[in-house]
Image (cartoon, rainbow, N blue to C red):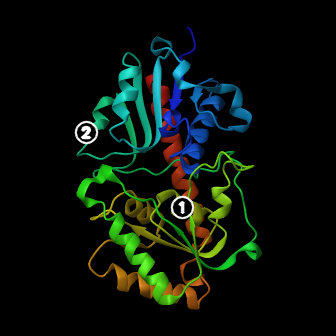
Amino acid sequence: MAEPRILLTFAGSMDFQYRHTTVGDVMALYNVATRLVQQGLRPRIAWGGNLFELDPLRVDIRAVPPDAVDCLVFVCGPLAKFIGTLCNRFEKAKKIAVGVSVIERLGTERLFDAVVPRDSAAYSTFDLAVADVGWPHLYVDQRHQAPGLGVCLVGPQAEYFASDKSDAVAATIEKLKSELRLPSIGLNTLIYPARPNIYCAEMELQSRQILVTTRMHATLLSVFHRLPVISVDQIEGGAKVTRLNTKVGIDTIQVSNDVGPRLLNVLRDAISSRGESIRPSVAQRQKLIELSRDALEMSVTKILNYI
């Protein structure tokens, strides 16, 4: 029997200018590919950036004929509207989504034969980025961390419609920075193709004593590195940030009328303790890795069952 022709994709597969791809997305892609290779398979990976020992498996998705794929796997990220374009291109292939956020109002999960959600309204596993199965993580000695605040905001999340309160949250954080006269720096988890290491965002997240973030992967990487983090869910009612933080035991500040005072109190405590009041514990870090590995194994098993 011929080896199944598997194509691993993610949001970055179509992001040819690297404008929206994040380091957490690539970590998840790498982890799934690594486990499939360990199962004796050779999936093609639709990504143009460095994948270390997996580089020989990389392809440009634009060069892959639609009839050359038996199984299309989409890894990580929300199942947003653009997914329809990807699924239509590989219409005849079996389609599996793993480590994804299911947004029921969009209904895009119905485009797939199988879905392993990292989070949904009904059921959640975990994100795949922090399974620690070979990705060469970048570590920063705490002595390099500057005083003050790192701020990592995801920006608008239109896939959540009116529940997205990104503007209000950003304004609240900006106001508190001014009131407390905190030295701060804006950070992100994006890929930076012009830098010597395109994945340097992982290091930059560790550059300040305290991180405030609305990005899920920024929170997860902070727990992985035991970096003091204040995690804010900007989706009214809570979404992936709240759901995954709850599994690890990390506090989440949710959007509400008193988000400003609550964030102010947490910030003051964090500043007075030099971050120790919000530093993730060793146990939380271990729980994070275990949850990610469990979700990864569940995802790989699902893929193997469909090829």
Alpha carbon of mark 2 to alpha carbon of mark 1: how far?
Answer: 27 Å
Q: Nearer the viewer, residue 296 or 160?
A: 160
Above-or-below relation of 248 to 83:
below
> Which residue is outermost to the top?
1
| Residue 221 shown left or right of residue 99 in the figure | right
- Residue occupying image coordinates x 54% and y 85%: 270
The residue pinned by badge 2 equals: 107
Query: Which secondary structure lies at badge 2?
Result: loop
Does residue 164 appear in this view? yes
**93 on left or right of 165:** right
Q: Amino acid at mark 2?
A: Gly
Q: Residues within 10 Å of mark 1 (few under 14, many from 20)?
A: many
Q: Is residue 307 visible?
A: no
Residue picked out by circle 1: 218
The residue closer to the viewer here, 189 or 100, is 189
**How many labels were placed on the picture?**
2
